[in-house]
Image (cartoon, rainbow, N blue to C red):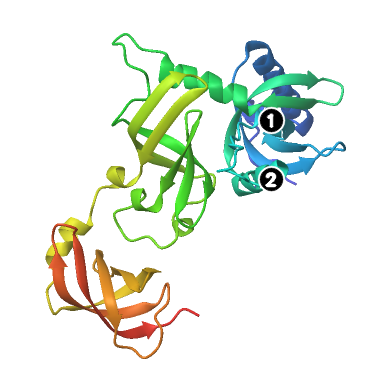
Amino acid sequence: MMPNETTNTPILTLDSDAKLETAQSISDLTWHEIQNAYRTRRILTGMLGGIEKTENGSLIAVVYYKDFRTVIPVTEMMIHLMQDEAHDYGELALRQNKILNNMLGCEIDFLIKGLDPKTRSIVASRKEAMLKKRQIFYLDKDASGMPKVYEDRIVQARVIAVAEKVVRAEIFGVETSILARDLSFDWMGDARERFQVGDHILVRILDVRADSPEQVIVHADVKSVEGNTSKENMKKCKIQGKYAGTVEDIHKGTVFVRLSIGVNAIAHSCYDSRTVGKKDQVSFVVTHIDEERNVALGIITRIIKQTI
């Protein structure tokens, strides 16, 4: 090659050596960070990646911090199950397993309890991390005498489990269940369509009771953060108007429809000979507007498209 010929080789710059870290050196750096966190009792955050049974049959949660496998015994996962006649969950381990299954993929905090430098294995506690967070966010007061989490404050929460009608959220070390009716002003047939484990969501604190780190109860909602668009959309809705909509839910013969114009509607009858089902696209005629409840009432004239 002639000296004046250019090549496509990129110029070697001074910061190139910073990018040449090996997988081993990155791993060493992370291990150093983990050792520091153990010494200083710093809370780390990882992803719940698995559930395993030990040889003696006890459950452990496997959490990954970067690439390091961390083991948390189920007793340190802060899963509260009341055991009495009113709450007969059958075999405790089965119930714990089910809860952990629903949490797979969620983000959790933990404090390291023990390290083995030879095998680079880690044992940790979610419970201790949660209790520490509760102290910091609910019990410690700032200069004005207020805790960090208080009634009416909007805070970020983690989604740790989702079922059809409820989202389980963790708000700074406290778990709370948010029912479908508190998730949105819109009719919502299945919360799993809008919320996933691992999501970060904004919630409004409705009520807090904090007596000690072990005794903290929080109620929150999502809908008041999002606001109610249906009120504004209701102005577009006319009596005898015909609108397309999606069936969100059916309960005791009442059909809950979300109209395409962004309005919640209720149908007590359907003129189509076929049976209406969840997620069906329907044609809806408005017969009455309930302004107090912000709902359109009417009739399903036909099913446009059935969801099999």
* Residue 250 visible from this viewpoint: yes
Q: Is residue 94 above or below residue 123?
A: below
Three-letter amino acid code at the position of disc 1:
Thr
User: What SS does tag 1 mark?
Assistant: helix
Furthest-front residue in this view: 85
Tell me: 265 left or right of 128.
Answer: left
Q: Give x and y (percent) for residue 77.
A: 64, 32
Q: Residue furthest bottom?
A: 273
Spatial distance from mark 2 to mark 1, Cα to Cα?
12 Å
Q: Residue at x 40, y 88 (%)?
A: 274
Q: Is residue 44 left or right of residue 282?
A: right
Answer with the quarter of the image where residue 66 lies.
Answer: top right
**Contact? badges 2 and 1 (CB < 8 Å):** no
Residue 50 in view: no
What residue is shown at x 71% (from left), y 45% (from top)?
91
Q: Residue at x 37, y 12 (%)?
A: 141
The tag on residue 75 is 1
Point out the tag, 2 or 1, that comes first from the N-terminus.
Answer: 1
Please, what is the three-letter code of the amino acid marked with disc 2? Asn
Is 136 left or right of 299, judged from the image as shown?
A: right
Closest to the observer, 65 or 231: 231
Q: Which residue is mark 2?
A: 97
Q: Which mark is residue 171?
A: none
178 or 66, which is in the foreground?
Answer: 178
Rendered location of residue 208, percent (x, y): 37, 28
Q: Position of residue 147 (x, y in %)?
A: 36, 18
Residue 198 as seen in the image, left or right of residue 227: right
Pick whichever, 271 or 1, lies toward us: 271
Q: Residue at x 15, y 78 (%)?
A: 241
Q: Is 67 in front, or is 7?
A: 67
Number of numbered discs overlaid on the protein picture: 2
Mark 2 secondary-structure assignment: helix
